[in-house]
Image (tube, helix red, strand yellow):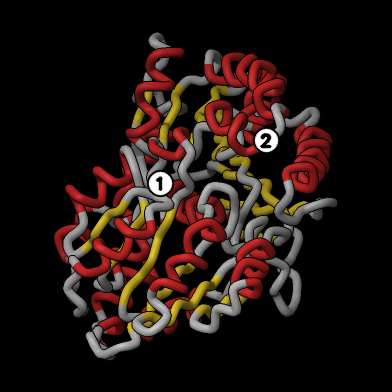
Amino acid sequence: MRLLLLGFYYPPDISAGAFRTEALIGALANRLPEGAELHVITTMPSRYVTHESPPPEEETLFSGSVRLTRLPVSGGGHGFASQARAFASYAAQVRRLTKGETYDLVIATSSRLATAVLGRWVARQCGAKLYLDIRDNFVANLPYVLLGGAGRLLAPGFGWLERWTLHQADRINLVSRGFAPYFQARYPSRRFTWHTNGIDRPFVEAAESGFFERRSCRGNEPLKVLYAGNLGAGQGIEHVLPSLAERLSQRVEFTVIGAGAGRAALCRALGERSIKNVQVLAPVPRKALLEAYCAADVLFLHLNTLPSLESVLPSKLFEYAATGRPIWAGLAGFPARFVREEIENATVFAPGDIEAAVAALEQLELHCRPRWTFMTKWRRDKIMDEMATEILALVTNEA
């Protein structure tokens, strides 16, 4: 049995997609039948180039059952055009590597649809079954990501690609139940599953060891508020944080850890207002991120005021919740409902609403409180175990 997994990001790249792919590979490797091989084709780190030395282009993992190939890609960066060039480089190399190869199953984990389309093409070429893990609603997002009408012009073409891809998939997983109305309405004959994001093992282990309780949250001013994550159009941090920091200048010290297309705009807005209570830092490895979480009193999250973002479920929510820290979140729609129903000591305000944000901060209990029920329910390893079992069932005649 030969399986191929396509995922653009993989550690040491720092992204939700990289960590999800890593966890899925581990779960699959633990369940592969004897003699089976899983070939993973990903990229060399390109999203955040902060690594001291590049990882090997070829690795053998899990006692030889997993072969990992990292492809160097041109482009990279945070702009849409730059990312498109990087993916074009990846796709061309994948097509070359898989030419003439035979696989029983192709697995593609995809946020911006392109990896899913590539998986569909490879599966068709080698007559394999296809499992898709869809991590975002790219076609619905496109008009809001590419402004000036470009997104609306491109959306029909990408909509055709989406239909071409999903109609041929043997199984489709959607990472958020908020995607259900869109996908079920357009693909009523498709069978969907809902293996979502979850809490990665380092955060589970840190919580279980009491790491996050080394320093209890304190209510003394100024509060230390941390945002850690991408700084892109989907977050819109540059639209809310400068005003919020200015309003709370005597009460709160903000730390932002991240990079993305919005980072320059955020720094520019902070400089223009001479705001001194916001520190913007580059992305850090997970060990340093755990320390940053431990040093914070409150964790901040924000999604932009775009209708398409009301259906997503940010992976950052699971990471934040594992720390036991109070969560202060600007969310609407499905993710807001998820926070209210699933996460204790977390408050939600309408994205971009400064007055509502200040009021939400007042509602938080400023102490560290482990969320054991949440962690038991949303462990990444548990979710990936279920997902891996479902994937392998497609090629072991159990589906």
Between tags 1 and 2, which lies in front?
Answer: 2
Instruction: Quadrant for the N terminus, please.
Output: top right
Q: Where is residue 4 in the image (x, y as percent from the top left)?
A: 61, 38
The image position of residue 251, as x and y in percent, is 34, 82
Q: Where is residue 300 in the image (x, y as percent from the top left)?
A: 38, 66
Q: Is mark 2 on a helix, strand or loop?
A: loop
Q: Residues within 10 Å of mark 2 (few under 14, many from 20)?
A: few
Query: Which disc, if any, is residue 249?
Result: none
Task: Using the image as rendered, state which of residue 136 and residue 194 is in the foreground.
Answer: 136
The one nearer the camera, 347 or 210, is: 347
Q: Name the residue under label 2.
A: 147
Residue 351 seen from this side: yes
| Residue 1 visible within the image | no
Figure check: 23 above or below 7: below
Q: Is residue 96 left or right of residue 53?
A: right
Residue at 48% x, 77% y: name it.
Answer: 255
Q: How many labels does the image show?
A: 2
Pick whichever, 284 or 327, lies toward us: 327
Residue located 77% across and 37% down the image = 91
Residue at image position (35%, 40%) is 195
Along the horizontal axis of the image, is 158 left or right of 342? right
Residue 204 occupies quadrant: bottom left
Whether the residues at callouts 1 and 2 have beta carbons within 8 Å, the answer is: no
- Quadrant of the snapshot with the C terminus: top left
Q: What residue type is labelled 2?
A: Leu
Q: Which residue is drawn at 55% across and 75% down?
A: 285
Earlier-in-chain disc, 1 versus 2: 1
Identify which amino acid the numbered label 1 is placed on. Arg
For this view, does 180 lie left or right of residue 73?
left
* Residue tagged 1: 31
Q: How crowded is mark 1: few (under 14 residues within 10 Å), some or many (20 or more)?
A: few
User: Where residue 316 sits: x, y (%)?
Assistant: 41, 58
